[in-house]
């Protein structure tokens, strides 16, 4: 019983350590051509189910590690990936599919 208790405590400490590596990442998704915020764009941490949607000002906040990749997508726009690289604030400029034609 004592060994199981010690093993449980070790696992609990490891889980706490992994959770502590998450940071709050904030940003704004903006249309590059119109310089307008994109409302309702999807922002997801690649390889996870952790995601959010931009607000009325194109702003978002999401929990991710500093080495994560964010995938931003919206109807009419090509999905794009952005590497966090330790940054905690982003201004993402987005080009619509229609501009490419």
Image (cartoon, rainbow, N blue to C red):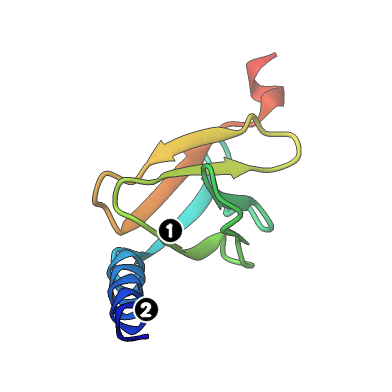
- Write the residue at 30% across / 78% down: 3
- Numbered badge on residue 27: 1
Q: Position of residue 60 (x, y in %)?
A: 51, 63
- Of the two numbered discs 1 and 2 on the same chain, state the one appearing first in sequence: 2
- Write the residue at 64% across / 51% down: 42
* Horizontal arrangement in the rendering, residue 81 relative to residue 13 (left or right): right
How far is disc 1 from disc 2 in space, using C-alphas? 44 Å
User: Which one is in front, 5 or 90?
Assistant: 5
- Write the residue at 54% across / 41% down: 71
Q: Residue furthest right?
A: 75
Which of labels 1 and 2 is toward the front?
Answer: 2
Q: Is residue 31 above or below residue 80?
A: below
Callout 2: few (<14), some (14-19), or many (20+) C-alpha neighbours within 10 Å? few
- Numbered badge on residue 93: none
Q: Is residue 85 above or below residue 1?
A: above
User: Which one is in front, 72 or 31?
Assistant: 72
| Count of marks placed on residues | 2
User: Which one is in front, 100 or 65?
Assistant: 65
Q: Secondary structure at mark 2?
A: helix
Q: Position of residue 81 (x, y in %)?
A: 48, 35
- Numbered badge on residue 4: 2
- Write the residue at 34% across / 56% down: 65
* Horizontal arrangement in the rendering, residue 61 relative to residue 36 (left or right): left
Quadrant occupied by the N terminus: bottom left
Question: Dividing the picture into quarters, in which one does residue 39 lie?
Answer: bottom right
Q: Position of residue 50 (x, y in %)?
A: 56, 58
Quadrant occupied by the C terminus: top right
Q: Residue furthest left?
A: 86
User: Which one is in front, 99 or 91?
Assistant: 91
Q: Residue furthest front?
A: 1
Q: Secondary structure at mark 1?
A: strand
Callout 1: few (<14), some (14-19), or many (20+) C-alpha neighbours within 10 Å? some
């Amino acid at each position: 019983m004592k060994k199981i208790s010690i093993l449980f405590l070790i696992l609990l400490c490891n889980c706490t350590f992994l959770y502590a590596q998450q940071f709050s990442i904030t940003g704004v998704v903006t249309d590059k051509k119109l310089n307008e915020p994109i409302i309702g764009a999807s922002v997801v941490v690649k390889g996870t189910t952790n995601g959010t949607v931009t607000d009325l000002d194109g702003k978002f906040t999401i929990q991710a590690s500093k080495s994560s990749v964010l995938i931003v997508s919206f109807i009419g726009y090509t999905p794009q990936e952005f590497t966090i690289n330790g940054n905690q604030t982003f201004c993402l400029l987005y080009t619509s599919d229609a501009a490419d034609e």
